[in-house]
Amino acid sequence: MTGTSASEFRKSWLAIIACAVGVGVGLTGLPFYTFGVFVNPLEEAFGWSRSEIMTGLLIVNGGTVFLSPLLGVLMDRFGVRVIAIPALIGLAAGFFALSFSGPGILSFYLGWVVLAILASGTTPLSWTRAISERFDQARGLALGLTLLGTGVASALGPSLVQYAISSGGWQAGYRAMGLFVLIIALPLALIGLRGTTKPKTEEASGEAAPLKEGFTFGEAVTKPAFWLIISGICFVIFAQASSTVHFIPLLRSRGISAETAAGIMGALGISVIIGRIVVGYLLDRFQAPKVARVFLMVPALSLLLLLTRDDLASAWLAAILLGLAAGAEVDLLAYLVGRYFGLRSYGLIYGVALSGFAVGGGLGPMVTGMIYEANNGYQTALIGGIVIFAIGAGLIGCLGKYPDFARQAKT
């Protein structure tokens, strides 16, 4: 680690901790990785079908699609803190709202609408923006460490939520997550995000603020890289979300107990953590498309394993392989946006890219649920997932060299 990189970490280590916890509990963390834990309890409690339950995830991702570009604009103007803090409070409110679902499915959907609207500022858009502002030379590793939060959420969340459900019913699972947000995540964000309030402007500071390097949104959409990134991430997260959310229900359909399935899901979480660190380290040393071509094809092997084997050992290995990719896609999206388009309009560009991410993340689990019900099994969905992973990895792998913003600024 160079002196500049070490200096960045000394100054901003607390921000990494706060953002790691924030992204861990945020919409792409706890709600996503624990969703599968609730599928069987909700089926048993209300008789809802699997595809009906999965529609909840489509709703929350739909909120991300529509709100992320707006939030990106607001962050570019006012900073991260004024968005992220209220969103964490909204996240807790959404979890509590979900605990009052039933017996009608519409009440469940309403809970997800509340979560989607009030907690939209807890996506990686907020946390990666805060880190990208503080890190340059060590940005890949810093983003990787920050996004470890989702790895911890996927490693510990399913088992802890399953324990809460076993002790107090499915309602206790949602309420436990809400309390964690209020007691742990919110105070850390209040402390760690200091200094990410409204950026200084010429009017506020009395002097001209330097223009951040990079493209405007209008310039970015004219670049092939913009569309390759959005389409590639959409394909990857379609397959990744489907595989992750349906992982526990798939294991349960093969006769594996709820507790064992949650434990195997924990192995996926540990693998996410490893993937975050390794990908972050590699992004600082190799071109991102090269890293993407390797890591985004690994989960295809996981699905192939689940397709051809149904023993317990294969389930553990499949979880580990699937987690490595989950440790790559969010890191890559944040890193790709920063490197290919700069920080000038990072919030808006990342917000739009995150909309593509959310489209795939919302549609994938629901479509897979429909395929499961139509075929009374996951075989067809597993084959489709392998193909979709390959398409996504290929699209992102086609990206070229990073633009030289410093050189452009001189010309």
Image (cartoon, rainbow, N blue to C red):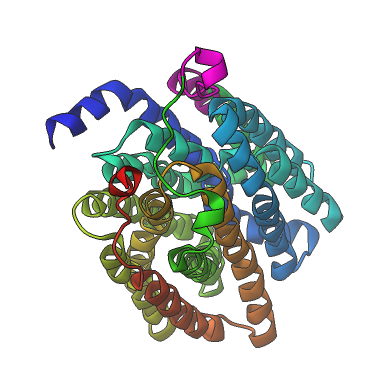
Question: Where does the N terminus fall, quadrant-wise?
Answer: top left
Q: Is residue 384 placed above or below 404 in the rendered structure?
A: below
Q: Residue furthest front?
A: 411
Number of numbered discs: 0
Q: Is residue 261 left or right of residue 410?
A: right
Q: Is residue 269 left or right of residue 30?
A: left
Residue nearest the observer in this picture, 13 or 78: 78
Please say whether residue 36 is visible from this viewpoint. Answer: no
Image height of 47 relative to 314, above or below: above
Q: Is 181 drawn above or below residue 309 in the view shown? A: above
Q: Where, by quadrant of the figure, is residue 39 drawn?
A: bottom right
Location of residue 62 in the rendering, given as x and y in whole percent from the top left corner: 69, 56
**Percent x, y of residue 238:** 54, 69
Foreground residue among 115 and 231: 231
In the rendering, at what x and y percent does residue 342 appear? 40, 46
Q: Residue furthest top?
A: 206
Is 114 part of what is drawn in magenta? no
Q: Residue at x 57, y 46 (%)?
A: 348
Image x and y of residue 133, in percent? 40, 33
339 relative to 173, above or below: below
Residue situated in front as seen by the camera: 301 or 99 = 301
Question: Bounds of the magenta span?
Answer: 184-207
- Which residue sits at x=51%, y=71%? 235
Q: In this view of the protein, which residue sits in the foreground, 131 or 346? A: 346
Residue lying furthest left in this view?
A: 2
